[in-house]
């Protein structure tokens, strides 16, 4: 009991309703700012000969800090998955990851001494910038998308939404039975050929071109709105099919938006993570070659 | 006639029959008198084909009549044979009317006019004499019956069985068993679960409900009977049930008048009180012995043993120990003093107030489930804020209640016979104070289940516990400035109210100064502002409300209603004012609490024009959370969906920490204003899941975590009883390769709950077909760092909260 009590208290403290960006009153933002400002001031006060570059003592210092940071930032991927005991908080890690990662913009740039060229050193720098910029997108999406996703899905899980779509399809099939053959085949296509989503761009757009359900809806609507003579006898049945299709299109839009949001939340990681691996490779090459030329 | 029997046994139930057969075997002159024309009427009247259980399992059977679990017919057949085999002297149709005389010379008169002479009388008449009747209006309707002989006699009827004891459950099951009979059977049970029924019966009832054979309503009482309609009060309000027949199985009280006419004294005036008996079952009339259900023990196995034992005692065997002796000896083992079990029981009964009216027999049974502690001076019994619900009593020594957490030197000593821990038992909340042995002490600890059973069956115990709890709660709230006289006056006028969810205790605008102490459950305080009920605060058990009116000329400034089923103590306002006038310290204390509440009120008032929508939103979020069951939660997982990126790392962390099965479903569950209540355990104050767990595998840890231990038998009762759907039945998946192996070489399914396909591929046959057990959140009990779901959330969306923290902290934030 005595052992778990203090932990209980810390998890209570962490339970404060604060996002990773505001964690502990921006502790890591402040730390990152401090590091960056010190680095910038030092840059102007240190007078290396012949000029600023990665090879001066100051450049080596920044380089060491930068390389250490990159390795540590990468470890977030392990921390997230290694669910060990102890009073760690992934939120604190994320907060530090974000702000210290951004501080690399200053540290690494100053480390270059603004010397760029077509070489492995600049390659490493470029890869790092891609990782940081993709991370910035991540921050942007993480702070904007969840709210929209939550409101869009209301109380439904993705599985429930898809189950609902299947239920609607079953209703469609029933409701379409009394209709004449041409309409039935239209409804059949709506049931069989509707894709919930497609490739990356389809996912991102949140809509599907030539969606069979949407097309069936607009065609059947056109029928009722056009000449009434030919459809009089099927008017009521057609009406109920249209209203079911209407519900399906609402639900389809919702699922597609849900998938769009999920894609937005994940897509940047498909840049961020592979480029981190490339960066680690380029960074190794960069460090080895520097030592080789020492 | 003329013959004087050594033993006359009245009643041929399991106890009487066993006694008579043993007497026959010993060759003692005896007679067995039976009112009806067959042996063992109670069991004879069981439903045809009823399966009779042989509980408790731990007890050995010693008797010349054998007994093992089987059908009614099998058991009656065996007994008839054994009775004949031992040449037992049975007189059927002998309805005993009167017993007079003294030890060695009793005269027994039957309704038929026979007179029987005996030296000793064994009364084994059971309690079936007078079944309890329905007492609501219309309780005398002709279609109400108190007995069901053959459930196969009824077809196409709406039948309501009232009473969820074993008899009621068995009747309901019998009536609904064959769907061909077309009966529509509903069982009503007054309490929330089935605490007094055999777990196996409850399991059958639940599976019958799951199969749609019958329905049962818990927490439901009949209100009115009219031809064709039974009106009932359910936790959700009144309802009308169509009814052609009511079978009321409401238990029974001892046929006390007859027993008292013999001169036998009872333990108290209560309806359910039992005859006072010595340890050899001798009543206050020397020579008259009482055994079986009338002695307080309704189980067949016990009755059979008692029948044997009592004849041994009468025959001069003073060495015989009851059958449960070795089990009890183990329980008392290790305590100081060279006492026998019987001495310990006597000490318990003499020293501990609440055991005073409990018979030795009942105490024996009760002790089988309890634990004895011996604490050295200074040893902690339990800590403040620990969440335990067992009840303690001081048998010898002293314990100190540390009433002030800031200064542990201020203590209230509790001496011999006093109980403690009762508030935890009643309210389900954390312990209010640390208790430490003040001297070497012997304590008895009664698990909540056993204590609740004792309270339910012995009204005197219920009163004693209620009384002490009320007193302690008054003291805890108003401090020790309150004098014993005032406590007595408050207690004398205190009224205990049982309230359902959503009932109003205080109505804003009413004139009244009564003060309420919340004993169990919780309430919310709301204020009507601009036609809307605005949420002010959540008040949990152990606090009091209504005192504000004492300072506001008696006018209620807010409405208070219960969030869940609650018990509330009502203290009349005038006595309260008088007390405050006499005790300025108490007035000061109450004024202090009021200042804080006033602040909240005026804050809300000030917001109503400018930030009306903020307050409104806060109020509706609070109501949403209470609807989602946070009113009875002690610790729940919430997800702020404005931060949740849907990475499901919380589920991964849960599975990684707990044998590869996630105990939470993040995406499922309701959401309101971005606050999401995922499907995850709320660790309720009075956990529904604990209600009927046959092996008692669901426990509450000292820190409040409700968890399931390894004794789970996989019956699924808890899963069905959980209103929040957070318990699942699952098999433990095979072990996965480590994280690095997955990360570097792609071995195994990766972190989190393994997918079915992988499990099916890797699992051994034993792992695939093993028993499913219940799994639920244990709040990462015993894991350093606390709940993994919260630690593993990358964005701070997942938080664990207790309702008073969340609702009342959020309120302060409401000003932001």
Image (cartoon, coloured by chain):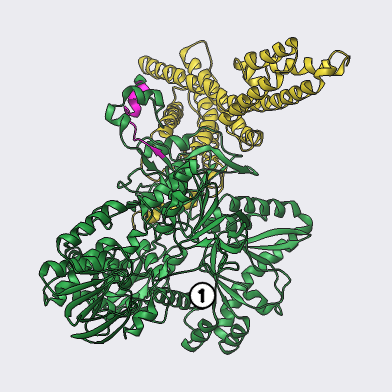
Does the stretch in magenta take in B737?
yes
Residue B335 visible somewhere in the drawing:
no
Q: Nearer the viewer, residue A211 or B215?
A: B215
What is the drawing colour of chain B?
Answer: green
Q: Please provide percent x and percent y for residue B223.
A: 59, 64
Residue A249 visible somewhere in the drawing:
yes
Is B643 placed above or below B43 here?
A: above
Q: Nearer the viewer, residue B583 or B658?
A: B658
Give the position of the N terminus of chain B as an image quadrant: bottom left
What is the drawing colour of chain A?
Answer: yellow
Q: What residue sits 53% from the left and 12% below the top?
A: A117
Q: Which residues are magenta?
A: B729-744
- Left or right: residue B164 versus residue B64 is right
Tag 1 subunit: B
Q: Nearer the viewer, residue B652 or B15?
A: B15
- Left or right: residue B648 versus residue B773 is right
Dot 1: few (<14), some (14–19), or many (≥20) neighbours within 10 Å? some
């Amino acid at each position: 009991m005595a052992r778990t009590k203090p932990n209980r208290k810390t998890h209570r403290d962490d339970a404060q309703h604060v996002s990773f960006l505001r964690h502990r009153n921006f502790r890591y933002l402040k730390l990152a700012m401090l590091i960056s400002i010190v680095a910038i001031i030092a840059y102007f006060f240190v007078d290396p000969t012949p000029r600023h570059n990665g090879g001066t003592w100051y450049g080596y210092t920044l380089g060491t800090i930068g390389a250490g940071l990159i390795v540590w930032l990468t470890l977030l991927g392990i921390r997230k998955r290694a669910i060990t005991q102890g009073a760690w908080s992934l939120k604190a890690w994320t907060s530090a990851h974000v702000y210290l990662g951004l501080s690399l913009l200053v540290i690494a740039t100053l480390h270059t001494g603004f010397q760029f060229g077509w070489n492995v050193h600049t390659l490493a720098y470029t890869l790092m910038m891609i990782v940081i910029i993709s991370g910035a997108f991540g921050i942007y999406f993480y702070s904007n998308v969840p709210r929209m996703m939550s409101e869009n899905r209301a109380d439904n899980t993705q599985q429930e939404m898809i189950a609902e779509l299947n239920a609607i399809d079953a209703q469609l099939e029933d409701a379409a039975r009394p209709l004449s053959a041409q309409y039935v085949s239209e409804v059949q296509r709506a049931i069989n050929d509707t894709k919930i989503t497609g490739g990356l761009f389809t996912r991102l757009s949140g809509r599907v071109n030539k969606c069979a359900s949407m097309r069936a809806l607009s065609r059947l609507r056109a029928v009722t709105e056009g000449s009434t003579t030919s459809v009089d006898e099927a008017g009521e049945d057609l009406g109920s099919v249209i209203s079911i299709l209407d519900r399906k299109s609402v639900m389809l839009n919702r699922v597609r938006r849900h998938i769009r949001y999920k894609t937005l939340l994940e897509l940047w990681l498909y840049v961020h993570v592979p480029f981190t691996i490339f960066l680690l490779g380029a960074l190794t090459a960069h460090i080895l070659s520097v030592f080789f030329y020492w | 006639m003329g013959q004087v029997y050594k033993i006359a046994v009245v009643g041929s139930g399991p106890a009487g029959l066993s006694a008579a057969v043993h007497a026959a075997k010993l060759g003692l002159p005896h007679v067995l008198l039976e009112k009806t024309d067959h042996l063992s009427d109670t069991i004879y009247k069981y439903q045809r084909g009823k399966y009779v259980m042989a509980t408790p399992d731990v007890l050995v059977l010693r008797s010349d009549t054998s007994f093992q679990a089987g059908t009614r017919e099998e058991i009656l057949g065996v007994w008839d044979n054994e009775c004949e085999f031992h040449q037992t002297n049975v007189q059927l149709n002998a309805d005993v009317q009167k017993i007079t005389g003294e030890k060695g010379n009793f005269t027994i008169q039957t309704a038929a006019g026979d007179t029987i002479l005996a030296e000793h009388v064994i009364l084994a008449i059971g309690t079936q004499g007078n079944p309890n009747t329905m007492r609501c209006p219309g309780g005398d309707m002709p279609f109400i019956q108190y007995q069901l002989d053959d459930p196969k006699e009824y077809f196409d009827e709406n039948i309501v069985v009232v009473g969820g004891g074993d008899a009621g459950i068995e009747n309901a099951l019998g009536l609904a068993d064959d769907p061909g009979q077309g009966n529509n059977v509903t069982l009503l049970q007054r309490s929330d679960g089935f605490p007094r029924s055999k777990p196996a019966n409850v399991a059958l009832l639940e599976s019958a409900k799951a199969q749609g054979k019958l329905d049962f309503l818990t927490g439901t009482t009949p209100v009115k009977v009219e031809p064709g309609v039974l009106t009932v009060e359910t936790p959700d309000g009144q309802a009308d049930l169509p009814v052609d027949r009511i079978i009321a199985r409401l238990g029974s009280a001892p046929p006390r008048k007859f027993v008292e006419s013999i001169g036998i004294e009872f333990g108290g005036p209560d309806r359910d009180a039992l005859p006072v008996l010595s340890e050899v079952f001798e009543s206050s009339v020397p020579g008259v012995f009482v055994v079986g259900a009338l002695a307080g023990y309704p189980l067949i196995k016990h009755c059979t043993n008692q029948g044997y034992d009592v004849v041994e005692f009468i025959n001069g065997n003073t060495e015989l120990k009851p059958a449960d002796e070795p089990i009890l000896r183990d329980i008392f083992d290790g305590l100081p003093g060279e006492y026998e079990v019987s001495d310990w029981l006597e000490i318990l009964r003499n020293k501990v107030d609440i055991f005073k009216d409990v018979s030795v027999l009942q105490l024996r049974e009760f002790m089988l489930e309890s634990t004895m502690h011996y604490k050295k001076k200074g040893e902690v019994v339990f800590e403040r804020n620990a969440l335990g619900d067992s009840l303690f009593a001081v048998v010898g020594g002293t314990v100190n209640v540390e009433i002030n957490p800031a200064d542990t030197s201020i203590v209230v000593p509790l001496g011999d016979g006093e109980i403690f821990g009762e508030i935890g038992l009643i309210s389900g909340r954390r312990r209010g104070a640390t208790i430490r042995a003040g001297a070497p002490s012997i304590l008895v600890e009664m698990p909540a289940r056993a204590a609740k059973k004792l309270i339910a069956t012995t009204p005197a115990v219920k009163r004693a516990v209620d009384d002490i709890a009320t007193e302690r709660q008054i003291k805890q709230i108003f401090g020790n400035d309150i004098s014993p006289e005032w406590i007595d006056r408050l207690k004398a006028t205190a009224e205990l109210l049982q309230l359902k969810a959503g009932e109003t205790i205080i109505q804003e605008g009413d004139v009244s100064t009564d003060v309420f102490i919340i004993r169990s459950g919780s309430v919310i305080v709301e204020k009507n502002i601009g036609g809307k009920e605005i949420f002010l605060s959540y008040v949990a058990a152990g606090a009091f409300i209504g005192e504000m009116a004492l300072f506001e000329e008696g006018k209620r400034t807010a409405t208070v209603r219960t969030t869940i089923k609650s018990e509330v103590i009502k203290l009349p306002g005038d006595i309260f004012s008088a007390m405050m006038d006499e005790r300025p310290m108490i007035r000061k204390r109450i004024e202090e609490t009021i200042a804080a509440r006033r602040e909240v009120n005026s804050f809300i008032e000030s917001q109503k024009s400018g930030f009306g929508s903020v307050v409104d939103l806060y109020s509706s979020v609070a109501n949403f959370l209470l609807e989602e069951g946070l009113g009875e939660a002690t610790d729940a997982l919430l997800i702020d969906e404005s931060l949740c990126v849907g990475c499901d790392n919380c589920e991964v962390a849960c599975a990684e920490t707990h044998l590869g099965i996630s105990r939470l479903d993040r995406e499922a569950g309701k959401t309101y204003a971005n606050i999401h209540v995922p499907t995850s355990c709320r660790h309720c104050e009075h956990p529904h899941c604990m209600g009927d767990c046959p092996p008692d595998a669901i426990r509450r840890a000292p820190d409040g975590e409700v968890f399931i231990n390894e004794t789970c038998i996989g019956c699924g009762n808890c899963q069905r009883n959980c209103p929040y759907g957070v318990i699942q039945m699952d098999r433990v998946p095979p072990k996965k390769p480590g994280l690095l192996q997955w990360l570097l070489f792609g071995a195994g399914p990766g972190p989190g709950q393994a997918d079915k396909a992988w499990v099916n591929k890797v699992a051994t046959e034993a792992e695939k077909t093993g028993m499913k057990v219940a799994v639920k959140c244990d709040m990462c009990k015993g894991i350093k760092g606390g709940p993994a779901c919260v630690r593993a959330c990358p964005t701070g969306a997942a938080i664990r909260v207790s309702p008073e923290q969340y609702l009342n902290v959020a309120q302060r934030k409401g000003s932001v």
